[in-house]
Amino acid sequence: MVESGRRIARKTLYEGKIFTVAEDTIKFPDGSQTKWDVLLHSGAAAIVPIDNDGNIILVEQYRCVADDMILEIPAGKIDEGEDPISCAIRELEEETGYKAKEVKAIGSIYSAVGFSDEEVMLFVANGLEAGKMNLDENEYINVKKFTLKEVIDMILDGKIKDSKTIAAILKTKEMVQQEVL
């Protein structure tokens, strides 16, 4: 088995509202060292809403990094002291207007493990009831419904590019097929 490196120092370069940028010093088994830039994030929660007809609810919103409208599952940053399931439930209602009777954890992912420690906790929501959207300032969202097959096809066609959405939908698909959900 190949021995790995380890962090021996961390220096904060920038602290922002949403993330911190740091420079880590990594030491390898041969004694060599290198610097890595890392993005530190408090974590996020994302939720796959499934309506009573089996449709997946996605949100479409402008994302500045892509400079385009992106289809994704509802998600958001976990506030300090907030547990992930509460965040997922909050984001579901804020972004779609739906409330869920049942929410189940389905795991987590690192959104970009090569340079960020952001871990996204994934959930599935069932038993949806219409509520009221409560969007954040400068948040403009279109709520859209698709069959699971349509969402899978959009992932395979490259129309859905958001990593948390792809991971959560593929995991949900497998769990539905295995009748675990």
Image (tube, grey):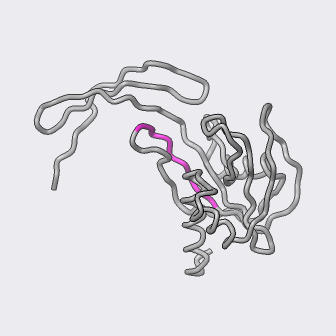
Image quarter (top left, top right, bottom left or bottom right) of the N terminus: bottom left
Q: Position of residue 15 (x, y in %)?
A: 52, 21
Whether residue 39 sits left or right of residue 76 in the image: it is left
Image quadrant assignment for residue 68 = top right
Q: Is residue 10 above or below residue 73?
A: above
Q: Is residue 39 visible?
A: yes
In this view, the residue in front, 25 or 154, is: 154
Q: Which residues are magenta?
A: 115-123
Q: Residue at x 75, y 61 (%)?
A: 57
The stretch drawn in magenta includes residue 67: no
Residue found 54% across the figure and 36% down from its top: 42
Q: Nearer the viewer, residue 116 or 131?
A: 116
Most extreme residue toward the left is 30
Q: Nearer the viewer, residue 93 or 39?
A: 39
Q: Is residue 119 magenta?
A: yes
Q: Nearer the viewer, residue 156 or 148?
A: 156
What residue is drawn where x is 50% and y is 41%? 118
Tally the marks.
0
Query: In the shown orientation, is residue 89 left or right of residue 5?
Result: right
- Toward the front, the furthest residue is 157
Q: Position of residue 36 (x, y in %)?
A: 33, 30
Q: Report whether 58 appears left or right of 33.
A: right
Which residue is at 84% across, 42% downward?
Answer: 134
Q: Position of residue 145 (x, y in %)?
A: 78, 63
Can residue 90 be seen here? The reply is no
- Horizontal and vertical percent position of residue 37: 38, 28
Q: In the rendered image of this protein, does residue 76 appear above or below residue 177? A: above
Quarter where residue 102 is shown: bottom right
Is residue 160 rendered to the left or right of residue 139? left
